[in-house]
Amino acid sequence: MSRTSGAVGELAELVLPWLPPRDLAATASACRALRAAASAVTAGRAADVARGLEPVPIPFDNLVDSRPYAYLLYTPFSLTPSAASLHAQQWGCTWARPPGPTWPRSDLGGFPSAECACSLGACGGARCPCADPEAEAVGSEAGVGMGSLRECGDGCACGPSCGNRRTQHGVTVRLRVVRHRKKGWGLHAAEVLHRGQFVCEYAGELLTTEEARRRQRLYDELASVDKLSPALMVIREHLPSGKACLRVNIDATKVGNVARFINHSCDGGNLHPVLVRSSGSLLPRLCFFAARDIVEGEELAFSYGDARVRPKGLPCFCGSLCCSGVLPSEET
Ligand SMILES: C[S@@+](CC[C@H](N)C(=O)[O-])C[C@H]1O[C@@H](n2cnc3c(N)ncnc32)[C@H](O)[C@@H]1O
């Protein structure tokens, strides 16, 4: 009974002394079976943060303390909070049927879209309206702000195997979530990544600005007492008119994908954040590309200054030569 605690321990102390030997032995054996089952669940969670929802498993790796994994509800795509609760995974389980993406949306509600009608294999060519002349350069520089990319989407005639959908197949590169002494978990390459290679999207709950502000206040309080590692991303995009600004709030704190483990680096890190637009979609998606060749084992990082994450005034341990000493934050 040395390891039982709280209510279970109290209950055991009350009940067990009254049991006959056979029932006491049966209770002990049931506890051993439960312990083995719980260990199997822990091992499964530690073996794959994505719980089978990405094309390749993404294991946790902790040589620093005793936490085997970080718990989150995994979603490969961004969702609205109502969809997230509707499709909530049972505690500890994978989804029987994962939810579909909130975008790209097929219904544009009257907004113009530049979808292509290319036949399969012809996308990305000179006549394809979704072709992006800058596509080759995407991801080639870190620390130069947010890039942009156009891809085919739900509004296009081509199918999912079209070559102009680099970011739409989930995480296909080998990654690992590694525990750090000062920064918490961090995302690392588990194979060589080449400059310009797509790494992952930043997926989570899509929030209204009002809800994002409400959560930020809460996360600030919890983070200041070390109770939470928030992953609320605020992306601002100035529209061509210069008069309006599109704001996208993605909260991956509790419902999100592997990108929520990417830490900040003051020197821009080795990832290039890129806003990807596709036909049939009102909102851009935030995607990360390798900004240079990355060796196996290297930590992946980008500058939170480009797509800001709260909370305020926390110390930065990125270790880069130009480290400012604090994590970037913003007034919302
Ligand atoms: C998006 S999460 C990144 C994953 C996080 N390390 C975890 O364990 O879940 C952002 C949080 O990670 C921590 N973090 C990220 N970059 C950091 C850095 N350079 N130095 C210290 N802490 C960092 C901060 O707590 C920040 O609020």
Image (tube, helix red, strand yellow):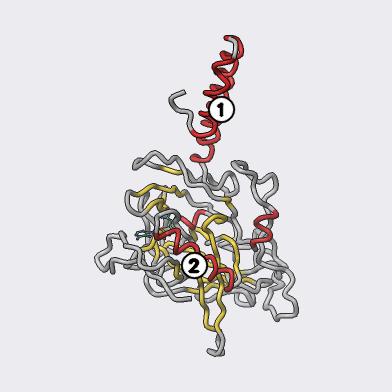
Cα distance between the residues tagged 2 and 1: 39 Å
The percent position of residue 91, horizontal first and vertical second, equals 61, 43
Q: Nearer the viewer, residue 166 or 124?
A: 166
Q: Amino acid at mark 1?
A: Leu
Residue 210's place in the image compared with 288, above or below, is below
What residue is at 54 percent from the left and 72 percent from the top? 149
The percent position of residue 166, horizontal first and vertical second, equals 56, 62
Q: Could you tell me which secondary element the residue under label 2 belongs to?
A: helix
Disc 2 marks which residue? 217
The percent position of residue 294, horizontal first and vertical second, equals 37, 56
Instruction: Judge left or right: residue 204 versus residue 105.
Output: left
Q: Which mark is residue 11?
A: 1
Mark 1 Cα-neighbour bin, 10 Å: few <14, some 14–19, many ≥20: few
Instruction: Judge left or right: residue 57 versus residue 303.
Output: right
Residue 116's place in the image compared with 291, above or below, is below
The percent position of residue 268, horizontal first and vertical second, equals 36, 67
Residue situated furthest top in the rendering:
21
Instruction: Judge left or right: residue 31 versus residue 271.
Output: right
Q: Which mark is residue 235?
A: none
Q: Is mark 1 within 8 Å of ligand 1?
A: no
Q: Nearer the viewer, residue 298 or 258?
A: 258
Residue 297's place in the image compared with 332, above or below, is above
Q: Could you tell me which secondary element the residue under label 1 belongs to?
A: helix
